[in-house]
Amino acid sequence: MPVPELAPLTPGARRVLDAASRLFYERGIHSVGVDTIAESAGVTKKTLYDRFGSKEALVVAYLQHRDARWRGHVEAHLALVPEPGVDRVLAIFDAAVSWSDENSPKGCSAINARAEIGDGHDGHPVFPEVSRQKAWLLGQFADLCREADLQDPSSMARAMMLLYEGAIVTVGMETFAHPFERARTVARILLESQPPLAEQVSTP
């Protein structure tokens, strides 16, 4: 799924979004009110509502702007491995390794937001946004596995997604150190267990 086109931000809106993004990620969405965000951003509540309309819309903007940064980070890593193959699939895990320490010490912002909001049946705009982000990542894995000419790219993409999602949750839970590095190792074993179609000998 394409990322929504993000409208340019005024200086005041940028301060609000930066403050909200930091606070939402560090403290959680429910525990941070608009008064706290406005005070941290050095603006009035009126400015916050004028720029974003509601706290719900600000939460979605926070998720969208983080996602845009993550996509740019992934694209930069994919550019380092231009040739299709196993290493290009693994580039997403490489991107996650270099991203997570600085940007995601508490795990995935989308998963965390989804866990906070509720059961998903109240029409909250967080749910379609989180679904869009996860569908994009699965699509990336599927495209890369197809480019690598693997025998069953869809199944392999789902396996890669499970490894990725397990790793990002493990980051947030601090179950053990360096989960993305471990996920990458397992991903390579799985990818190399399925040789490209071009290398397989067809049976009569």
Image (spheres, rainbow, N blue to C red):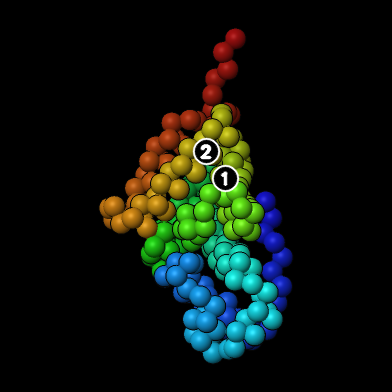
Are the two marked residues, 2 and 1, in contact with CB atoms closer than 8 angstroms?
yes
Q: What is the quadrant of residue 187 in the picture?
A: top left
* Residue 48 to residue 150: above or below: below
Q: Label 2 crowding class (10 Å Cα cut-off): few <14, some 14-19, many 20+? A: some
* Residue 141 to residue 13: above or below: above
> Of helix, strand and loop, which one carries label 2?
helix
The amino acid marked with disc number 2 is Arg
* Residue 110 to residue 156: above or below: below
Residue situated furthest front in the rendering = 122
Q: Quadrant of the C terminus?
A: top right
- Residue at 52% from the left image edge and 82% from the top image edge: 35
- Residue at 45% from the left image edge and 70% from the top image edge: 31
In the image, residue 47 lies at what x, y percent? 65, 85
Task: Report which residue position mark 2 lands on.
Answer: 158
Task: Report which residue position mark 1 lands on.
Answer: 138
Q: What is the quadrant of residue 65 in the picture?
A: bottom right
Q: Does 180 sit left or right of 61 as displayed?
A: left
Question: Would residue 125 be visible to someone looking at this image?
Answer: yes
In the image, residue 119 lies at what x, y percent? 53, 49
In the image, residue 178 lies at what x, y percent? 32, 55
Q: Does 202 sit left or right of 87 as displayed?
A: right
